[in-house]
Amino acid sequence: MSVEQFLTEKVAIITGAGQGIGRGIAMALAKRGANVVAVGRTVEKCEETCQMIKEATGLKAIAVQCDVSELDTLESVITQTIETFGRIDILVNNAVQASIGPLLDQKMENVEKAFKVGPFATLKMMQLCYPYLKIRGGSIINMASSAAKRWDMKHYGIYAAEKDAIRALTRTAANEWGADNIRANNILPHAKSPALEKWMKYRPEEAAEFIKGIPLQRVGDCEEDIGKFVAQLCGPESTYISGQSIALDGGQAYMN
């Protein structure tokens, strides 16, 4: 096995894998040997990810249509994964639904959707994958955010709240399931996802200030900066890392 193939035979489920960070993670894991289950609301985008994986690696990847906010449908993702690959080694909860704006403007249906896609679906997917992850030991990567670390959180309160809830669930999973050789970590990424690019387009002044606040003065690449790190976090050199929140943001967040 080459250094680049340290995830050979592993099976990874990635939600929100049809674009952006999810696609970048999927590509990075596949290039290191993992079989990928690309989950998303728009199956065509996930199929594009799978085709990109096949062209780049020759490995099999499957696309699974699923709106993770519909919690009762999540079990079908696990069923299709086991039917196809027979195992689960890596779970990446990447799907996100943001509700940005002042607290007084928040509609409860939007807040509820954000929490369903965020901490509710994250918890449910962890619960469903647990019996399979414990067989050989496994890795859970959950998507948090440095929004709660901003000195000025106005307009980001709901987003920060859902992401900090995910951080708490991840830390708990690391503690409760460590004896089963299941590791759980959060990443807090800044990357050129479609959502971030859209935000930068419509809020250029805020985006310019945002980039100024990044010591490395750039936004990360979805595969090169985020995906490759996730692959490393799932690999043999990271087997003693668990329960952590790791900012992949060019040095912007102060994690205390």
Image (spheres, rainbow, N blue to C red):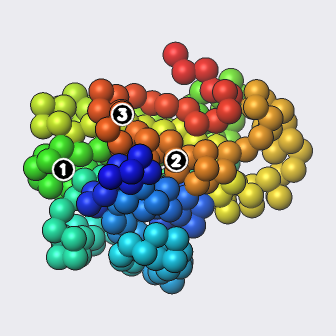
Q: Mark 3 packing: few (<14 Cα in 10 Å), some, or many (20+)?
A: few
User: On the image, which quarter does residue 225 sit in?
Assistant: top right
N-terminal of the pair, mark 1 or mark 3, is 1
**Tag shown at residue 228:** 2
Give 118 or 233, whichever is nearer the viewer.
233
Asked if the residues shown at circle 1 and circle 3 are in contact, with their CB atoms under 8 angstroms apart, the answer is no
246 sits left or right of 249 in the view: left
Q: Position of residue 134 (x, y in %)?
A: 13, 46
Q: Is residue 75 above or below residue 105?
A: below
Q: Which element carries disc 3, helix, strand or loop?
A: helix
N-terminal of the pair, mark 2 or mark 1, is 1
Which residue is identified by label 1? 133
Q: Position of residue 50 (x, y in %)?
A: 46, 76
User: In the image, what residue type sits under mark 1?
Assistant: Leu
Q: Position of residue 232 (x, y in %)?
A: 43, 41
Q: Which element carries disc 1, helix, strand or loop?
A: helix
Distance (Cα) linking label 3 and label 2: 13 Å
Residue lying at 56% horizontally and 46% vertically, measured from the top left: 226
Asked if the residues shown at circle 3 and circle 2 are in contact, with their CB atoms under 8 angstroms apart, the answer is no
User: In the image, what residue type sits under mark 3?
Assistant: Glu
164 sits left or right of 72 in the view: right
Q: Mark 2 packing: few (<14 Cα in 10 Å), some, or many (20+)?
A: many
Residue 121: in sight, yes or no? Answer: no
Distance (Cα) linking label 2 and label 1: 21 Å
Q: Nearer the viewer, mark 3 or mark 2?
A: 3
Give 88 or 236, whichever is nearer the viewer.
236
Which residue is identified by label 3? 237
Q: Is residue 245 above or below residue 62?
A: above
Q: Residue pushed farthest right? A: 205
Q: Position of residue 73 (x, y in %)?
A: 27, 72
Residue lying at 67% horizontally and 62% vertically, measured from the top left: 194
